[in-house]
Amino acid sequence: MGATIDNKRIISVVSVDGNGKTNTVRRLLNSKDKLPVEPEESGRNYTLFSKTFMADLPDNKELYLLDTPGSLNYINDVINCARVSNGAVYVINAISGATDQGLRHWWRLRDYSLPTIIYVSMMDNPEADFDKALDSIKLLFNVSPVPIIVPIGKGNEFTGVINLMRQKMYTYKDDSGKSKEEEIPAQYADIVTKYRNQMIEAIVENDEELMGQYLDGKEIPTDTLRKVLGKAVKERGAFPVFAGSASKGIGIDLLRDGIFYYMPSSSEFNTLTFKDGEKIDTSDKAPFSAYVFKTRIDAYTGKTNYIKILSGKLNKNTKALIADNNHSLKISKINKPYTDGLKPVEEAVAGDIVVLDKCEDIRTGYTLVDSSISQKMFEPSPEPKRVLNYAVEIADKKLEEKVGAALRKITEEDPSVSFARVAETKELVLSGLGQLQLDVVNEMLKDRYKLDVTFKSPRIPYRETIKKGVKNIQGKHKKQSGGHGQFGDCWIHLDPLKRGGGFEFVDAIVGGAIPRNFIPSVEKGIVKTMERGVVAGFPIIDVRVTLYDGSYHDVDSSDMAFQVAGSLAFKKAMEEASPILLEPIMDVSVYVPDHYVGTITNDLSGRRGRISGMDSSSEGSIVKASVPLGEMATYAPELHSMTKGLGLFEMKFLTYEEVPPQNSNKVVEDTKKWRQDEEENKL
Ligand SMILES: Nc1nc2c(ncn2[C@@H]2O[C@H](COP(=O)(O)OP(=O)(O)OP(=O)(O)O)[C@@H](O)[C@H]2O)c(=O)[nH]1
Ligand SMILES: [Mg+2]
């Protein structure tokens, strides 16, 4: 008999990198061995891809932990994990406390109103400072931390913790993680009073009546404190703080207990919601529903999908549909993700995370439902803000298809990376959230799929237009080559339009100088010619052509002949109308802590940017600017290093503007070169 839903917890462990999440997860799950890692992670010592493991605990409890990556390049994975969790353990280290670098992780938990425990890791470090950690939480997150434990000593002298709720001391004689409960020695009485008062004050803040009792100097029973705290945690009104050392196995058992005490179960709290707003009935009698939050593709074992069951139960006889594609769900094996590998189970219920193998047609973000509620869908994950693009250059063109197939798999595992072939520039463009993420994709192509590629900045989709209008330009096409001749003759004016004007064709023919049926032919010839401009072969935009005169031949005039005439007139007019190159200008918003505003505006000016405004949000300052796309190619990693990883940005197309004359020649040269290369490659 498995655990009941109230005895299960699904918890995301979240923080910036290097704070000890993975190590803590291993300890919380009582795993003797290191947790399995992907090849790309082992050299780096980072978690790049979230991992879900579970443990069966005494008293028929089940703990599912989602170990998330710390790098902001992988924040979408953190969000996917948060969406299936009942709560989070937010890890700060005892040396630096809560830092700016961790704010974005904190905010994402806040977005999902995820009840959160704060865990102060690495108390065994000689520079550990529990008070500083508590202060940093108050200062940075503007919340009252509720210390549930107080560490005894630090560094090598860190030997145990005092539980302020139970008012007992826990000591650890070796690093097995097992503690001995003892009475608190008299020498710690002052410490206990100090921190217990801090704890009680932070709890009673959440309950007026209790606050009154406290101010009247009444003793508040521990059970009442626990109850009020539990409620406040679920509403994110209070944040219990634990501390310990995963290396030494100290304090982890209390953190584990705290998760079961203070974090809700799936029957009380789910982040996921149905699109139609209907409440999820988490009982196992309700129709089955589940959400796929992670897809993993292993070169040997194939594809596995991690799903959270929200309602009902899943076994081999469950008749379920994949709501996203209406396929029926074929279940071969249902597994639970233990730290030493997947283990098959007969049945799983609401509040469980299980792993399905060989389900080819499901992937991250999909909803699985009983056929009786086939119209139900869970809210989709937010669209990632991809800010770094690279053109993928494949040394051996014959391997293009293979690269495409490998990228399909890689992006299925990490949907925050995407790729597409851009018709205009003929490039395969890969987009993601940052340098680390795309470096890892490159490495995966190389190591997992044996495909060598190089990344370079994508080509810029320039445009061409004219600076001045020209009048009275003739395009005449006349050919006499035995039999039928060809004759088309037209006169046009060409004028510039405002940016965004596109193309206008004005038919000003009077008196039948060109027969009605050939006027569209002239336009067609011009439109075709506009695809390749005269400066560097980029499409022409923002011009008006006025066709006002022409002549024709009863026998030799044809659609084709007038198309050619139109094209000739247009080309000639373009040459005379001071043609120029236009570059895309992006509307850029940079999100940074206030003290970086100066750095950011200076840098953007250096990129030929024009600052268009400032704004502020709960997440800091927003610098807005319009900047040429060509100057933004590697902005993501550069912003990262300018702001110690604190800056984020997004951009969208705004308009086209003239390329400054001093840059224009280089664009023309470079374009000629790549067009030549393209031609040679084609042969
Ligand atoms: N002294 C000490 N070091 C620790 C402790 N826990 C982890 N470390 C060390 O800190 C480093 C980072 O630990 P991880 O557990 O990989 O950190 P993480 O938060 O998972 O990092 P990312 O996966 O990159 O986000 C490793 O070198 C660990 O050995 C601890 O309790 N005490
Ligand atoms: Mg990790």
Image (tube, rainbow, N blue to C red):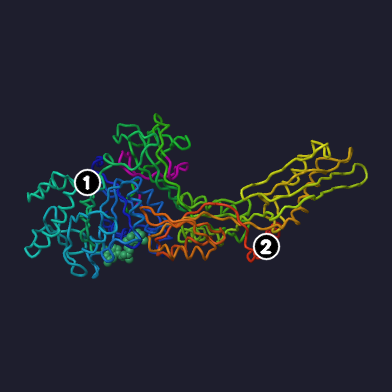
Relative depth, front residue between 158 and 460: 460
Q: Position of residue 120 (x, y in %)?
A: 25, 60
The residue lying furthest to the right in this view is 482
Element type at marker 2? helix
- Residue 118, by quadrant, is bottom left
Cα gap from disc 1 to disc 2, whole angstroms: 64 Å
Element type at marker 1? helix
Q: Position of residue 672 (x, y in %)?
A: 69, 62
Q: Position of residue 68 (x, y in %)?
A: 36, 54
Question: Which residue shows up at 23% across the image and 61% down it?
Answer: 135
Q: Amino acid at mark 2?
A: Val
Residue 668 badge: 2
Q: Which residue is mark 1?
A: 232
Residue 312 seen in render? no
Specify whether 419 is left or right of 558.
Answer: left
Instruction: Mark 1: give few (<14), some (14-19) or many (20+) Cα within 10 Å.
Output: many
Q: Amino acid at mark 1?
A: Ala
